[in-house]
Image (spheres, rainbow, N blue to C red):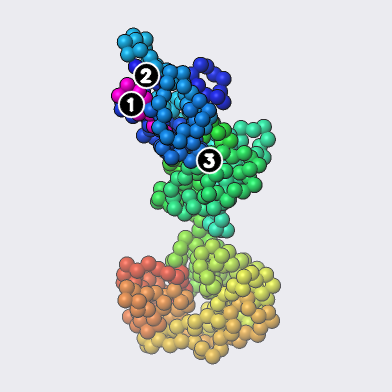
Amino acid sequence: MAALALSLTRRDNGSGITITLHEPDTLIGRQADCHIQLEHALVSRQHAKISRRLDHYYLEDLGSSNGSLINGNVVKEPVILRHGDTLEIHTWRFQYVNLPATTDDPITVKPAESLLAPDRPALDGGRKLDAVLEISRRLASNLALEEHLPKVLDILLEIFPQAERTSIVLYEPTSGQLVTKFAKSRSADTAQTSAISQTIVNKVFQEKQPLLSINAADDDRFDTSQSIIALTIHSVMTVPLLGIDGDAFGVVTLDTGSPIHPFNDKDLQLLTAVAGQAALSYESARLWAAHLDQIKHQAQIDIAQRIQQALLPQSLPNVDGYTFAARYQAASAVGGDYYDMFSLPNGKICMAFGDVAGKGIPAALLMSRLSSVVQSTMQFVDNPQQAVGLINNHMCRENLEGRFVTLLFALLDPNSAELSLVNAGHMSPLIRRHNGKVEAFNHDSGGIPIGIQADNRYHVQRRPLAPGDTVVFYTDGITEAMNSDRALYGSTRLRASMQLCDGDAYQLGDRIMTDIQQHAGQVAQNDDISILILARDRNSP
């Protein structure tokens, strides 16, 4: 029987191992299906072959890039192996031993991977599963997003003992760049972090495929950057981090400077599995963090909604001979429509009704400010023209982002039944006369919206209200309500709805809101809706 005894010239950890030769051929090379696998970039995929011919074994170099030596001589053609011959391939040295065919001595057979690293555990399925379970266990114990990826680096350095540096690169949507967020090195100098070619990182990120380089210095896929040279990087693995949707959100890299312990295909498979579990855990933590942020945001919105509702009048004045009604429906949790109605010390009723440009929280904030300005202004003046001028100047002084407010400001004198109105860029109110006719205030008397130009002069319209007359203030959320055919509710339908209701402010408010809903159907509301109604009783003196 013939056998090869192996010793490693770069290691001092024993006398080597013995490997039996295969019949009829024993293939030696870097490729995984070789009988003796030597994992190094300077070893060809199929480097050499030992074949049996009759009673002799022959060594043949298979056209390798760096050659094979027998007893120090380059093998140019098949040569007969004789007992004690020494075969050298790169840093590996084999000695041919021709054991007697009748020997009863056991032959020690080692896996091919042990030729590369006798003290390194084989990457079998059990180790792979253990690694995935370990990273899952550790990451599942903490959902703090900022702690997940640094933990991954610690785990990777444990799983891959030959790795010297590791890093995680994440995609930043705002800049559109891949940025190294976390890095770790076994070196005491923490600045010695992985600095892999940006071209390779981009390639792995874009193609979403892992990449292995056994010898980075000789790999033409790398740009031979100074980092490869300065950090003596020999072998590199780069794997994409894939989100739940299958898109890459980052890249993880490992590198080693050891020429004896380069990464191999099994290492890449393990890293890919571990990175997949890490990415899943990270995505779960990210979604959980987003969920918590959403809960916090919703809680803040709920508070803002309650505050805004508190700014609207909780009850309307009770005045003999008149009824008042209001309806408000925001398109989102908070809105920019505004109304207020309160009694003044002189017995008059102040009515303010506005629409802030925009929607949502910015509009709601401006609406709350307008509410306080109106209330404070009316403590000192009772002239509508003067009041609107002061309100406008205040809003102009502290206007932000060019936002403005269209405003109807009115004073009702219950004794004289006269309504004094200032229109600052809003739609003219509609009046339903006691005879059922619906008409608008004079459009020509409207001024520019509040918050655009300081010291603007506004004009006052005065209209007497007869018994049975009803006045409706409304926002464009009513007339622009849209159905599935993209048809608007419009002022014509609003007037028709007013004509069908006789002199009751509460019934008219309900009727208009119901009619808008019937028109829109299942189409979502896209703007705030507000109505303020005052009606003089038909039987009032």
Q: CA distance from mark 1 to mark 2?
A: 10 Å
Please check the rendered image and state whether residue 293 is part of the magenta-colored stretch, yes or no: no
Residue that carries the numbered disc 3 in the rendered image: 215
Q: Earlier in the sequence, mark 1 or mark 3?
A: 1
Q: Which element carries disc 3, helix, strand or loop? A: loop
| 10 Å crowding of disc 3: few (<14), some (14-19), many (20+) | many
Foreground disc of the pair 1, 3: 1
Magenta segment boundaries in residue numbering: 48-57
Q: Which element carries disc 2, helix, strand or loop? A: strand
Q: Quadrant of the N terminus?
A: top left
Tell whether 132 sits left or right of 368. left
Rendered image: mark on residue 2: 2
Q: Which element carries disc 1, helix, strand or loop? A: strand
Foreground disc of the pair 2, 3: 2
Q: Position of residue 217 (x, y in %)?
A: 57, 43
Q: CA distance from mark 1 to mark 3?
A: 33 Å
Q: Position of residue 305 (x, y in %)?
A: 50, 58
Identify the amino acid type marked 2. Ala
Rendered image quadrant of residue 459: bottom right
Task: Using the image as rendered, state which of residue 4 and residue 519 is in the foreground.
Answer: 4
Identify the amino acid type marked 3. Asn
Residue that carries the numbered disc 1 in the rendered image: 52
| 10 Å crowding of disc 2: few (<14), some (14-19), many (20+) | some
Rendered image: mark on residue 133: none
Task: Using the image as rendered, state which of residue 233 and residue 336 is in the foreground.
Answer: 233
